[in-house]
Amino acid sequence: MKIVIRNGEIYQAGQFVKKDILISNDKIEKIDDAIIAADADKVIDAEGQIVLPGFIDLHAHLRDPGQVYKEDIVTGTKAAAKGGFTTVCAMPNTDPVVDSIAIVEYINRKAADLGSARVKIIGAMTKGSEGKEIALMSTMQEGGIVAVSDDGKCVQNAKLMQNCMKYAMNYNLPVITHPEDYNLAGKGQINGGRYSTQLGLGAIPGLAEDIIVARDIMLARSTKCHLHVAHISTARSIQMIREAKAEGLKVTCEVTPHHLIMTDAKLVGFDTNFKVKPPLRGDKDRQACIEGLIDGTIDYIATDHAPHADYEKEREFNLAPFGINGFEAAFASLYTEMVLTNTIPLNIIIEALTKKPAEFLKLKTGELKEGFLADVIVVDLEKELLLTIDNMLSKSKNTPYLGVPLKGVVTSTICNGRVTWELSNV
């Protein structure tokens, strides 16, 4: 199939230039000033819009297998495509946990047959993510996992974590840590500080994150593994990552859109759609996240897409699960709240969603170049996104952006040369 994207401002080498793009099958065949579209199967007129590489999400929960009432690979990747994502990394906390080649193959097959985005799988670090015994990384790697993590079940045993790092090194797999000391976090619900006291909710102190980040950096120094810190949220943790990078350690990290945009002040109304883990922090930590992304300490933006059924989120605050449904509002929220307010330059947002995570995954995408995979999106920066329960493609609707107007709408998504989302078809 041949697709021509015409008249758009395409993003190349940090700048926008007026170019046309010819896509042939799954590759970008040609980028030029004017491409004749006579034999094209489809022509997309991007006049007045920008053309970007497809977004890549290093941290998402598709809930498949086992929790498909919240989300599944079909609905999750449709929602991802609507948000401009052409590659998503599925975390292993499914039911059963992704700790064997059988579950890896199931996800691979379903994503290949029915997915609207490329799905890369992150395998469990320990069996059942129970933090007791190292998982079968070798066989999972044969199935194509790209990293290992116990995600929401942070490994508390330092010796086991060290052994996991050593084992992962044998297979060149990054180790992803969800940093939280459970003894410090306890049954906390929100960030420790003014609002936890005011609202009478259990506190999750920033120290619970900082201690595990410090421990895992020291273990990474010892083992020489690639340590990746998921959804970083505190100023001290960011500073430790900065120092580790200056030392030459192979340490990377990601931040979510909501930790860049929001603070724990949002919890005043007890709205469970703002209940996330790590929790929304104070403004000092939020500013540190912004500064870390701008100066390159924070490498990537990842949504931590965490869909939950409405009846789960509508329970009492301390019983509701943590998590925000992230795919469909990710770019628009960042553009509206960060770029239009002159807080973060657009090129930094784009690079953290495209080129940098492509390098993490060793994918020939993330840039608009001839010969690269045809993962391309068209975005209308002037158009308004207004999410409603009826127009969201995800099964779950647990987003604080319902009914909130945002600027920056993905009008077309092309993944591997296939159109997976078009606004005009809605």
Image (cartoon, rainbow, N blue to C red):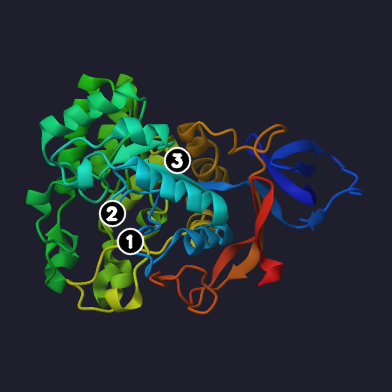
Give, as a three-letter code, the residue at label 3.
Answer: Ile
Q: CA distance from mark 2 to mark 1?
A: 6 Å
Q: Is residue 257 above or below residue 146?
A: below
Residue 100 lies in what quarter of the image?
A: top left
Residue 95 position within the rendered picture, expressed as x and y whole percent measured from the top left? 29, 57
Residue 136 position within the rendered picture, expressed as x and y whole percent measured from the top left? 27, 35
Residue 426 position within the rendered picture, expressed as x and y whole percent measured from the top left? 66, 72
Left or right: 231 in relation to 316? right
Q: Earlier in the sequence, mark 2 or mark 1?
A: 1
Q: Is residue 209 above or below residue 202?
A: above
Near mark 2 (Cα within 10 A), the count class, few <14, some 14-19 or many ≥20, is: some
Give, as a three-letter code, the residue at label 2.
Answer: Pro
**Mark 2 and mark 1 residues within 8 Å of each other at the beta carbon:** yes
Residue underneath mark 1: 66
Residue 165 position within the rendered picture, expressed as x and y whole percent measured from the top left? 24, 28
Q: Which mark is residue 96?
A: 2
Q: Earlier in the sequence, mark 3 or mark 2?
A: 2
